[in-house]
Amino acid sequence: MTRPDTAQHDPPTPIGDAAATDPPGAVLHADTVSFRYGRGPTVVDRLSLTVCRGEVHALLGASGSGKSTLLRLLAGLERPDAGRIVIQGRTVAEGRHALPPERRPVGVVFQDYALFPHLSVERNVCFGMSHRSRRERFAAARELLHRVGLEDKAKAMPHTLSGGQQQRVALARALARNPAVMLLDEPFSGLDAELRGRVRETTLQVLRDAGVAVLMVTHDPAEAHAAADRVSVMRAGRIETSAMPDEG
C-alpha cells in the first residue's frame, strides 16, 4: 500500500496533546487509521470510527476482517502505520508515534479474560491499581466487585468460578483503571447461549452506568443488534456500513 503524501496535511498534533479537531461528543475517534504486520497485507485500511460517551458500539465482521487488530491499535498494543487515534480529545497515536497502553484511559477485556490463576479474585482486581496504597486498592476492589455482583467471591481463586463469573472479574479489573473507553474482544463467545445473554446484559449495564464508551467486537449479528446502540460492519480492514440497529 502506498503511503499518503503528508506534505499537504496539517502538521500532526503532538502525542498526548489536545487534538485539533474531533467529532462532537466523541470519546474515542480513529481517523483514517491503517496498519499491516511487517511486509504482509494491509489489515486495517484507512479506517475511521467514532464512539461517544455511554455508547455501546458493536464492530461486526468475520474472522480475519481486522476487528481484533483494530482493538490492539486502540489499546496501544500495536502502532498504526498511518492515521490518528484520539481519546477524550487527546491524540494518543499519530502514525508511528504513539502513547503506550499504560498512558491511555482504556480498559480491555479479552475473550479468554486473562486472569492471573495464582491470585485471588480481589487481588486480580487490585493488580490494575498499583499507584494506590494497599488499603485504597482493596477498598476499591471490593467496591468494583460489588458493582459486578461478585462481592462474595473476593477470596475465591479464578479456577473455582464459572465462565460468567470470570468474565465479570475481568470487567472489574478493567474498570479499576477508571477507563474512558472499554474494548471488549468477543468476551461472551465462550459462554453457553443461556448464560451469554444474561452476562452480556449485566456487563453492558455496568459500563453504561459508568458512562464508559464501549467498542465491542463480535462475529455474531444477533448479539450486535441486541446489545449495541450502533453497529459497524467491518470487511477487509474497512468499515462497510455503520448504523443504529433499527436502521437495518
Image: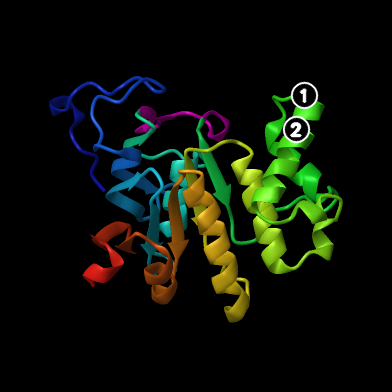
Residue at (30, 48) in percent of width and height = 49
Q: Which residue is mark 2?
A: 137
**How far across and how far down the image is residue 92, in percent?**
41, 30
Residue 112: assigned label: none
Name which residue lies at 44% across and 71% down: 223
Helix or strand or loop: what does disc 2 sit on?
helix
> Mark 2 and mark 1: span between their CA atoms?
6 Å
Question: Mark 1, residues whose alpha carbon is within 10 Å: few (<14), some, or many (≥20)?
Answer: few
Name the foreground residue: 47 vs 43: 47
Which residue is situated farthest in the left direction here?
8
Query: Compared to 243, does 119 lie above or below?
Result: above
Q: Amino acid at mark 1?
A: Ser
Badge 1 element: loop
Residue 112 in the image, given as x and y percentages of width and height: 65, 61
Where on the picture, by quarter, is residue 4?
top left
Display coloring: rainbow
Which residue is more in the foreground, 239 or 46?
239
Q: Position of residue 237 (x, y in %)?
A: 33, 57
The number of numbered discs placed on residues in the rendered structure image is 2
State yes or no: residue 98 in magenta.
Answer: yes
Magenta span covers which residues? Answer: 90-103
Residue that carries the numbered disc 1 in the rendered image: 133
Asked whether residue 248 is drawn in magenta, I would say no
Whether tag 2 and tag 1 are in contact, CB under 8 A, the answer is yes
* Crowd tier of the residue under label 2, counting other residues whose Cα lies within 10 Å: few below 14, some 14–19, many 20 or above: many
- Looking at the picture, how far across and down is residue 147, in whole percent? 65, 49
Asked which quadrant contains residue 193, the reply is: bottom right
Say above or below: 248 vs 156: below
Residue under the point 36% across and 56% down: 41
Res. 111 visible in picture: yes
